[in-house]
Image (cartoon, rainbow, N blue to C red):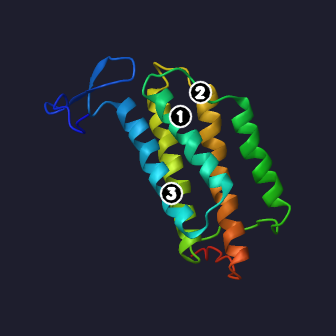
Amino acid sequence: MKIYTKTGDAGQTSLANGHRVCKSDVQLDAYGTVDELNVAVGSLRVLCDSEQLRWIQNRLFDLGGTLAAAPAMLDAKDVEQLEKWIDDYQLHLEPLHDFILPSGDEATCRCHLCRVVTRRLERCMIRCQKEKEWAIELQFVNRLSDFFFVFSRILTSKSGQKEEKWQKK
């Protein structure tokens, strides 16, 4: 099988259901952002490999398929899994009373990058929401951003660094 098909040379591509759309379509932006997020998570795994991150990458492939017009693959249990990890991590963290700056070591910064790409994905999905029904998928993405925030705090703690608080002007 050749990697190139030439079918997208004029700026269109096919969704999973065979429907042709412009490559600037908001739906393609959404699942392209899932792909970008998966690369960011893979980049984070280089520094702190974990079963959680591997699981997230697999769920992101599921999400990307759904956003590309394939049948839904995520369910409430996936959202609950993220919530469990968030709750477990928060037991080991000091309560947060201030905004913190995205900083720290390289793994922590990559985790923050995952968080903001996740938020961009959420905005892309909401722009598509007029035509699609992605309730569970949006919940998953919302929790995933929360997971990356809490995980970044865990990474900061494990590295022995201190969280840098926002200094209001």
Which label's residue is closer to the chain start, 3 or 1? 3
Screen quadrant of the N terminus: top left
Sequence order check: which comes first, mark 2 or mark 3? 3
Residue 42 circle label = 3
Which of discs 3 and 1 lies nearer the camera? The answer is 3
Secondary structure beneath dot 2 equals: loop
- Say which element carries label 1: helix
Give the answer, above or below, for where 91 lies relative to 139: below
Q: Is residue 27 visible?
A: yes
Q: Which residue is mark 1?
A: 63
Mark 3 touching mark 1, by CB under 8 A?
no
Q: Would you identify the image quadrant in which residue 76 lies?
A: top right
Task: Tell me the tag on residue 73.
Answer: 2
Q: Nearer the viewer, residue 168 or 21?
A: 21
Q: Earlier in the sequence, mark 2 or mark 1?
A: 1
Quarter of the image for the C terminus: give it. bottom right
Contact check, label 2 and label 1, Cβ < 8 Å: yes
Q: Residue furthest left?
A: 10
Check the image and report above or below for 112 versus 85. Answer: below
Q: Residue at x 46, y 42 (%)?
A: 34
- Residue 132, percent from left and from top: 49, 20
